[in-house]
Image (cartoon, grey):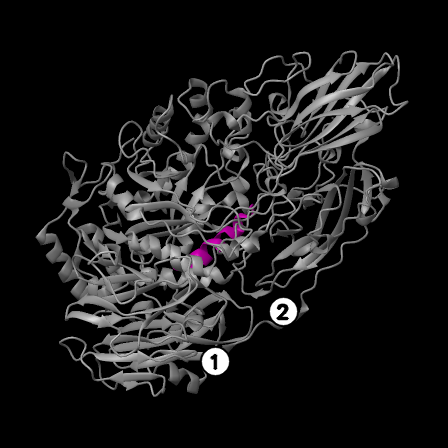
Amino acid sequence: MHHYSSGRKDGKGTFRRWSLLALASVAVLLATSGLAKQPTLAHRAGVALNAGNPSNALVPIDQSLLSSNGLTDEVQWDSFSLVVKGQRIFLHSGEFHTFRLPVPSLWLDVLQKVKAAGLNAVSVYTHWGLINPSPGVVDFNSFRALQPLYDAAKEAGVFIVLRPGPYINAETTAGGIAHWATSQVAGTMRTNATDFEQSWQDYMAGIIAETEPNQITKGGPVIAVQVDNEYFQSGFGNQEYFQELEDKLRAGGIVVPLTYNDPGEGKNFVNGTGHVDIYGLDSYPQGFDCSDPEHWSPVVTNYHDYHEGTNPSQPFYFPEFQGGSFDAWGPTAPGYLACQELTGADFQDVFYKTLWAANAKMLSFYMIFGGTSWGAIPFPGVYTSYDYGSTISENRLLNPKHNELKKQGLFLRSSPDFYKTNWVGNSSSSAVSVSNSAAFVVFLSNPDTNAGFYIARQTDSTSTATTEFSLQVSTSNGTLTLPQIAPSITLDGRQSKVIVTDYKFGASSKALYSTASVFFAGQIGGRDVLFLFGDSDQEHETALALTGTSGVRTTSSLVRFTSKKAGSTSDSIVNFMSGIKGLVTVWDSSTQLVLFADSDTAGTFFAPVVQSTSKSGDAETFKNYWQFGSNETVLVGGPYLVRNASISGSELALRGDLNASVMLTVIAPPTVKTITWNGQRVEANAKASSTVTSRGGFAGQVQLSSSASGVHVPTLSNWKFADSLPEVQANFSDAAWIIANHTTTNIPDKPLFGDGRVLYGCDYGFCENAVLWRGHFNASGNEESVNLTINGGEAFAASVWLNDVFLDTAFGNSTNNDNSIDEVNKVFAFPSGAVRAGQDNIITVVQDNMGHDESGSSTNAVKSARGIRGFQLNTGTFGDWKVQGKVGGYTNFPDKVRGVLNEGGLFGERQGWHLPGFDTSKWAARSLSSALPSGAAGVGFFVTTFDLNIPANTDVPISFVFDGGSTATTQPYRALLFVNGWMMGKRVGNLGPQTKFPVHQGILNYKGSNTVAVALWVMEPNANVSPTLNLSVDGFLDGGVGPIALDNPAWSPRPEV
């Protein structure tokens, strides 16, 4: 189904809806109705409101110059930017995977934190393997649902770029491809092979059905859909595969633009078969090694040239730009704090602004929130945590990266002139003149308003030196050398700055220039507001035409006003001297409010969008969206987080989080007389309020809840124990197990030796987590060993028994151990007396499947040969081989809520011992640190329960910590951590690095009983294994996102296998 707008479409698929009459009509309506009350008029008449700066409200967008896909004019574009509903936007986005946060009630929390950073969108991968766990089954329940995400995005006021794959990479098993398809599809994956095409039909049909009514054309948040992921146009069936996906999306009614993310500067899918509407480039300039976080690779310098030579008629789009890094298994793994440092606030400052300097107007940072690769979600190269060193940490706490991103986000939101700029040149040519060659400056200029943006960094982007320089700039008052009063512009090491010229703010004000950075610009309560900031150990200046009556200048000795003319005007030059700490009200008049703060203080402020109160049209539908539903905001300083704001009559209601008692500083319309924080009235401090501003200023103390000091978590004790490896006992029957008798496989890596039988778990429905094999042979008595080749993926392990006698463990190491092993060929010797001559003997293999590989250099790499690739006795032959993984395999697994990737095939898992409500009253009491009886190798289950009573209206992140957080890798054990039935962690004691496993409310019951189970696999006997496990409170936030639903189904009887 194709949906066309009512506009007339020319032969190029461009909508022409421009008319002077329409523009004139809009001008009259705006003049009579007020800008904030008619935020959708621009869309109806082709005028961009650019609501963040009302002075730009009537900058026209000539629709005849815009491109579209011919299906909708709700999302269009030109060479500068996206145009959504007739308004230019700077797409400022971050990646968020809902499947890595399996508590839908918490998705709004992440989205509100994204919005608070000034971002206006999220990019979202969906996971084929979770949604379509077996052929013909499509499941959008629980955490797999899309509708709760779309609803939360509308509530938060952020757009969505949906990325459904089918292949997504994302450091997830098989790159997100359904495990069943990796063994059932004979053709080459990710091509137009007929059986592969058929395999994704149901999944994509489900994605389309969920998404089609949630496109922006129908009042939803989805503005674009990406086709597959980081793919190449050349090669057999490649471009045809892309075309098949695009045809499927279009036939299902997806009318928003289709996009693509090129893994390198390959110019794929710009033209030709399978080409997309908007091309994008992924870039990770620091790579994925966080071991030396102070060492930087330099910025990429050819971005702008590449775009101009690739798709200059489209906006420059980075679907993935580095927002962190993944981390691999191994004892030398640096951990995610190092990744957070490598890609920290200074990296964001320099590298993100390098994208701005390349004239990119569509950015998405991978990741904004990494989350948790729980269960079997990871591919073998990563461990459970997917924190990624991202702006929002795995436990959902904000880190220093959030403040830097917020400074950038609010500048972009405040600066609609920046959405349309020409790239003029840089200081390597005559286009820009700087006094010091150690500074590198790029000049961008808005062709309609002549606003200028000079983006400065160190010429050596890795330099930590202090560089001082002056800069010649073009202004409406001629060429100036900046600064005029201060001695220089300063770059303190790894720092970047945007020097603005002819910068409009509010309804009628303009800064001729500013070497101080812009934090916020716009209107509040009918006044033009400009909030500048800069490092306290540097000098900054701006030139302004100060207007209004009853104006009051700051009396601070560190702020100097001068009458020196800036060019041909008498704008006041305001010099901010070094040493300023806190917020300074520079100018406070009837028409203007000018503020300055040091960088740290600026980072404590938020500018929440005030929700529209309109009851009709787009202003109601998009009531939480800046530009589209609301043009109103306030400034709020002090709290940990401001989630949202609303004004009713004379009351401003703020909701957010506190991590300490603070002075709340608010700048609001003067009509606001009362302020509430999370529903509680805040008493004003009259003296402090008056120092902020005499019109709409407010300051009052908000107190952290007294319950903060009363939050305690219990010690995990009273463990109950049961053996979880009865399979090695003589009386165990595997009669209900599947006979592994296949002699052919679609998996490319064929068996290496044996008798022709294929022992790959996925060929029998057991693709993930622990898989057990039992090979029977009738012994002659001459058997001395068995040769096995076992493949489990990087960092795997497999322990082998003959009957009830432990033989040995094969260890797969990791890249951070300088010895990446995903497959082991090993001869397991039989101890004397272990073979039972004349009887049925059994080789038992307990194997940990670490996930399927990603595509890599071959799209068929996802067809990983997990299992036993070779088996041979030194003499004699095997009879039956039996195999067992999770109960029911991928076709009939019982736990439909937690899904196909939650469980494996350990006996305790098959029995449901990890689930709440399983009766352990008859089990033995045994501490976890005592490990298995007699120091044996094997598998045991430890279960206990504990109660929590966390106060309501709080957010208290909790983690489980093994071994006191020790990074030692001396204990050869693996532990699966189950919390209320969810497998939330895999601890590998001999590899590391992860010891701490955050578990969110919603998995944890904060007002009741919780069950924790540890499946402990000891891989060597008498190895002094003694794991410990404790609870840790990671923080206390007074506020929170609201009620969190529980969805933790309890134990019920299961089939005996």
Residue 215 percent coordinates (x, y): 34, 42
- Is 832 above or below relative to 80? above
Residue 95 percent coordinates (x, y): 44, 47
In magenta stretch: residue 532: no
Locate the C terminus by quadrant: top right
Which residue occupies 29% across, 75% down? Answer: 541
Q: Please name the residue that numbered disc 2 is placed on.
A: 708
Q: Is residue 643 visible?
A: no
Q: Please name the residue that numbered disc 1 is placed on.
A: 683
Question: Callout 2: helix, strand or loop?
Answer: helix
Mark 2 Cα-neighbour bin, 10 Å: few <14, some 14–19, many ≥20: some
Q: Provide the residue span drawn in magenta.
A: 102-118
Give whichever of discs 2 and 1 has the lower sequence position: 1
Q: Is residue 814 visible?
A: yes
- Is 770 above or below relative to 708? above
Question: Callout 1: helix, strand or loop?
Answer: loop
Calculate the distance from the C-alpha at mark 2 to the C-alpha at mark 1: 22 Å
Under mark 1, the amino acid is Glu
